C-alpha cells in the first residue's frame, strides 16, 4: 500500500509559504484559478492580477519552480500546478476605540499557502476510437 503512494509522489515538487498576511477566504479564488495550468501561464495570470496577495502566491510558485529545477532537475516547460491550497495560521487581535467607551475587535488573519507542481507526462497516442 505504501509502494503506491511512493510511486505517485515521484514527480511532485512542493513549496510552502507560511505566514502570508491574508485570510483564506481571499486566497482561495486566486489559488483555484491557477490549478491545472502550466506554471508559465499561472505566473503571467498572477502578475497581471489586481489582488494584493497575488504577489505572495507568485513568489511561492517561483520557489516551487526553483525547487523543481535545482533539486530534482525537472524541465520547467513541462511543469503544471497540480494542487494549490491554503490553511489558517495565527490571528492577531487588535482593538479600536469606539463611542461611549466601547471597543471593537480588529482581526488580522495569517494563512499558509502550499503549492504542489508536477511534471506533465506525455500521453501515448492511441489509434482508433477504442483503446
Image: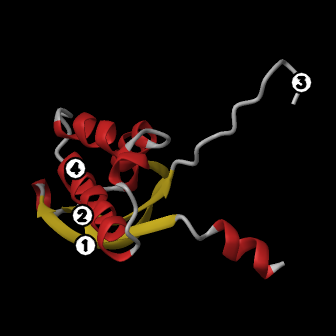
Which quadrant: the N terminus?
bottom right
Q: SS for tag 1? A: strand
Residue 52 placement (x, y as % from top left): 16, 45
Task: Please tell me the numbered disc located at residue 108.
Answer: 2
In the image, what residue occupies the spot 68% across and 76% down?
6
- Residue 86 drawn at (x, y percent): 43, 59
123 on left or right of 113: right
Q: Nearer the viewer, mark 3 or mark 4?
A: 3
Which of marks 1 and 4 precedes in the sequence? 4
Q: Quick one: SS at disc 4?
A: loop
Crowdedness near tag 2: few (<14), some (14–19) or many (≥20) residues, C-alpha within 10 Å: few
Q: CA distance from mark 3 to mark 4?
A: 46 Å
The alpha-carbon separation of the residues under discs 1 and 3 comes to: 58 Å
Sort mark 1 into few (<14), some (14-19) or many (20+) by Cα contacts within 10 Å: few
Decide which of tag 2 and tag 4 comes sooner along the chain: 4
Q: Is residue 90 left or right of residue 104?
A: right
**Residue that carries the numbered disc 3 in the rendered image:** 130
Task: In the rendered view, tell whether residue 111 sits above or below residue 51.
Answer: below
**Disc nearest the viewer among 4 and 1:** 4
Dot 2: element: strand
Q: Contact, CB < 8 Å: mark 1 with mark 2?
A: yes
Between marks 1 and 3 in the image, the one whose residue lies nearer the viewer: 3
Residue 41, image x, y percentages: 31, 36
Q: Are marks 2 and 4 in contact (CB under 8 Å)?
A: no
Q: Give the residue at x 27% y 62%.
A: 107
Disc 3 on helix, strand or loop? loop
Local crowd size for mark 4, using a 10 Å CA cut-off: few (<14), some (14–19), many (≥20): some
Q: Which residue is mark 4?
A: 53
CB contact under 8 Å: marks 3 and 4:
no
Q: Nearer the viewer, residue 108 or 62?
A: 62
Q: Which residue has dot 1 on it?
A: 92
Q: Which comes sooner in the sequence, label 3 or label 4? A: 4
Amino acid at each position: 500500500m505504501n509502494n503506491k503512494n511512493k510511486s505517485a509522489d515521484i514527480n511532485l515538487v512542493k513549496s510552502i509559504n507560511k505566514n502570508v498576511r491574508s485570510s483564506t477566504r481571499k486566497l482561495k479564488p486566486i489559488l483555484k484559478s491557477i490549478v491545472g495550468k502550466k506554471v508559465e501561464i499561472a505566473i503571467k495570470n498572477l502578475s497581471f492580477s489586481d489582488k494584493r496577495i497575488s504577489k505572495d502566491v507568485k513568489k511561492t510558485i517561483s520557489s516551487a519552480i526553483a525547487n523543481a529545477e535545482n533539486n530534482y532537475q525537472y524541465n520547467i516547460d513541462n511543469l503544471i500546478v497540480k494542487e494549490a491550497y491554503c490553511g489558517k495560521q495565527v490571528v492577531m487581535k487588535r482593538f479600536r476605540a469606539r463611542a461611549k467607551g466601547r471597543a471593537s475587535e480588529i482581526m488580522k488573519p495569517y494563512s499558509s499557502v502550499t503549492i504542489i507542481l508536477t511534471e506533465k507526462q506525455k500521453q501515448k497516442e492511441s489509434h482508433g476510437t477504442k483503446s
